[in-house]
Image (cartoon, coloured by chain):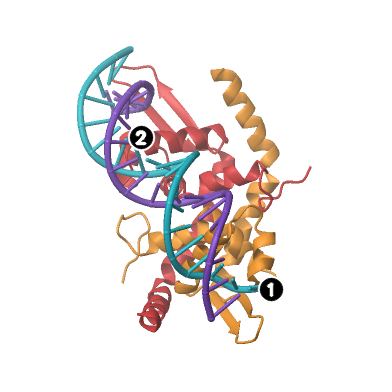
Chain colours: A red, B orange, C cyan, D purple
Amino acid sequence: MEFNVFASGCPSRPTLEHVTGRWGSLTVGALREGPLRFNELRRRVDGVSEKMLAQTLHALERDGLVHRDAQPTNPPRVDYSLTPLGHETAERLKALIDLVESRMPEVLEAQERYDSRLA
Amino acid sequence: MEFNVFASGCPSRPTLEHVTGRWGSLTVGALREGPLRFNELRRRVDGVSEKMLAQTLHALERDGLVHRDAQPTNPPRVDYSLTPLGHETAERLKALIDLVESRMPEVLEAQERYDSRLA
DNA sequence: CAGTATCCAAAAAGATACTG
DNA sequence: CAGTATCTTTTTGGATACTG
């Protein structure tokens, strides 16, 4: 069976988007080092709203990248962690993020050149 | 200098989003194997509109990931290619995409389980 | 061919209030 | 704590028409 993210309509495209999207990438990245609870995640992923975090976690859980472990205690405690597949994905995502971060000086220079040429 | 994509306001976040975003990831992926002209790209990146492709290319060019080579001929010919930094980025992105595509059967199964539990 | 400009529809995101 | 529900605003996206 063939999956090609370049073809619109291919189910791999939404999944890739969940992983690489704004909040997805940060959520997966945050879970790389271990399980986190909902509000811990919220603090880690700077700027995310409750709504977006919940939505993001649902999508990732549905894709089988994130595992949700809810203890039926009071107050409730819910731990989110990466599945094995989630971990593999996270490692490749981290490689990408690390590259971008390490090359930001270069990117910033390019942006300045671009802007000054068009100003 | 420190760049942390997890911090809102960090300039690395927009750049990561350009690369990982819906059209950015597909555009970079398409350019991995060599230069392409505007309309070649349009055909390759299935589903992209002129507007979105132009916007995406501007962002990637500004970030220094894509090089734009415009011949002043008539009709005009414009070739887009990856810069060295763009290439490094593309390789890491490809590693991620390949993983997701190869594991789609697993993802699809997880989705079915998730959906049938909540239906 | 390689775009830009404009307008409109749709979707995503954010703020807020509320619940088990 | 861990969310859901709802509403509003903002952003994004697509269609179309036009230009060098």
Q: Quadrant of the N terminus of chain B?
A: bottom left
Q: Quadrant of residue B63?
A: bottom left
Is B93 displayed left or right of A105 in the figure?
A: right
Labels 1 and 2 positioned on one and the same chain: no
Q: Position of residue A77 (x, y in %)?
A: 34, 25
The answer, for residue B97, to whether it is visible in the render is yes
The answer, for residue A95, to whether it is visible in the render is no
Q: Position of residue A90 (x, y in %)?
A: 52, 49
Q: Quadrant of residue B115?
A: top right
Q: Position of residue B17 (x, y in %)?
A: 45, 57
Is D12 displayed left or right of B34 in the figure?
A: left
Q: Which residue is mark 1?
A: B34
Q: Callout 2 environment at 10 Å: few (<14), some (14 to 19), or many (20+)?
A: few
Q: Position of residue B89 (x, y in %)?
A: 55, 67
Q: Amino acid at mark 1?
A: Gly
Q: Amino acid at mark 2?
A: Lys
Q: Is residue A68 above or below residue B34?
A: above
- Residue under mark 1: which chain is it in? B
- Residue under mark 2: which chain is it in? A
Labels 1 & 2 near each other (Cβ < 8 A): no
Q: Tag 2, which secondary structure?
A: helix
Q: Which residue is mark 2?
A: A51
Q: Is residue C1 above or below residue B20?
A: below
Residue under the image location 39 percent in, 63 percent down: B12
Is B112 displayed left or right of B10 in the figure?
A: right
Q: Nearer the viewer, residue A6 or A57?
A: A6
Mark 1–mark 2 Cα distance, whole angstroms, equals 41 Å
